[in-house]
Amino acid sequence: MTFPLHRPLAGLLLTLAGATATAAGERLLFNGQPAPGLRLTVVDMEGEVPFTGDAVVVPKPPKPQVPTSEVRAERRGQAVRLQWKEAWYAALRFEADPPWDLSADLADATLEFEVRSDDLAQAGLNIAMSCGPDCGRKVNHVMASRALVGKGWQRLAFSLQCFVREGADFRRVERPFVLETSGTGSVELANARIVRHGQPNTPCPDYRSQSVTATPLEEIWSLDWWMPRHEAKRAEVRQRQQAGERVELVFIGDSITQGWENEGQAVWRKHYAPLKALNLGFGGDRTENVLWRLQHGELDGIHPKAAVLMIGTNNTGDRREDPRTTAAGIRRLLDEIRQRLPDTPVLLLAVFPRGEQPSDPLRRLNQQLNQLIASFADGRQVVFLDIGHALTNPDGTLSRDVMPDLLHLSEKAYAAWADAMAPALAPWLARP
């Protein structure tokens, strides 16, 4: 539930509220300008600029990756307006110096602000708070924010619990509020504050069960293609059934699996096309998104000799999820596959290494995850296989000829993957 406000009355209320913030038990973030001790920065993927004066544009580096993108902000009375075009990332970031101590407010405080937008058709909003490296959380508000377009000023109130995870230390919150987006759009922000004993009006998922709660992928960059791809895969299965074609092998995963259709297509044609293999890899997917797909028909009507499952790097990467939570999502997927394909054994792959160095924080999270999911194997219906050694150098580093962006695979890497996996699949595929 949200509450509409009307200007210019709202502007007067903002001024009065700002003047009495301390007395009301609130911590002001922004009311026409950042509160003392806060810095507002306008950010895109390749640069950032402090918000000073009445308007700023994020400068481009000498060789921008996205030359056509633009991110700018301008003052609008008591509000700030963010505009972005073809941006991979854009944000209004509030930074506290010195960091804020919010530890005493976590139980019932809210992060509250007002937003107005007439253009989010190719965008959406995410709300984030950071208490340091690996501390904090982003709340996906993409679809809900799109629903507010054209409805005037709306007050949103998020419980601080939306941004807290087990072990998080909120005694030094460096970024008490970040409004994130991408694509193309505009939004106005006003009256941002932390309210003690606030009343949240905007829900957020429980991070402890997010990985096992089936949901479609609803990221700004996925909305145009994710559901159409799901429907296309279902249609592909129906067409194969009508043609009397049996799927002997199914791959289930994220963008790395989807990449068999791109960088890996030549390897796929050689090794897996003869098996009438089915690729159920979707870029950006986390465990809960795969679960939704499986529960909505992607395995219906097939009886493969084997399934290959690799998932989790977007859980641990994008939202820095506790490996135990990601492992629970993978366990849930194995149960779902067993229910829908009771006679199909699963080759459960360790999540591939990422990042150039073995010390990369996200690679370390994946290593912890792999240690957990290895125990899911029973040697018969579920076999665990770690082929990381086939992708890394002897010293554990990753080369860009294997993973050009240190996450996704080259054709060379897909060939190494196929070779490393072949001995494990061979006995299953040889069955009548």
Image (cartoon, rainbow, N blue to C red):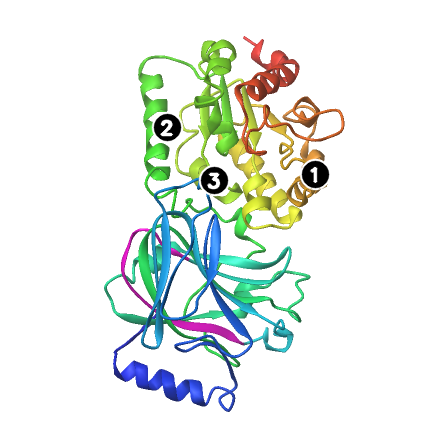
Percent of width and height locating residue 62: 46, 43
Where on the picture, by quarter, is residue 262?
top left
For the residue pair 336 and 8, the one nearer the viewer reads as 8
Q: Amino acid at mark 3?
A: Gly
Question: What's the residue at 57%, 16% (across, down)?
Answer: 415
Question: What's the residue at 62%, 71% (across, down)?
Answer: 99
Q: Are marks 1 and 3 in contact (CB under 8 Å)?
A: no
Which label sits in the foreground, 1 or 2?
A: 1
- Mark 2 element type: helix
Prevailing secondary structure of the magenta residues = strand
Q: How many marks?
A: 3
Percent of width and height locating residue 141: 41, 58
The magenta stretch is 109-125
- Describe residue 409's horizontal placement relative to residue 6 as left or right: right
Q: On the image, numbered disc 1 is attached to which residue? A: 367
- Describe residue 249's horizontal placement relative to residue 183 as left or right: right
Question: Image height check: is 243 above or below 256?
Answer: above
What's the distance in space between the residues labelled 3 and 2, CA to CA?
A: 17 Å
What's the distance in space between the residues labelled 1 and 3, CA to CA?
A: 19 Å
For the residue pair 6 and 18, the one nearer the viewer reads as 18
Q: Is residue 343 visible?
A: no
Q: On the image, numbered disc 3 is attached to which residue? A: 284
Q: Amino acid at mark 2?
A: Lys
Percent of width and height locating residue 267: 51, 14
Q: On the image, numbered disc 2 is attached to which residue? A: 233
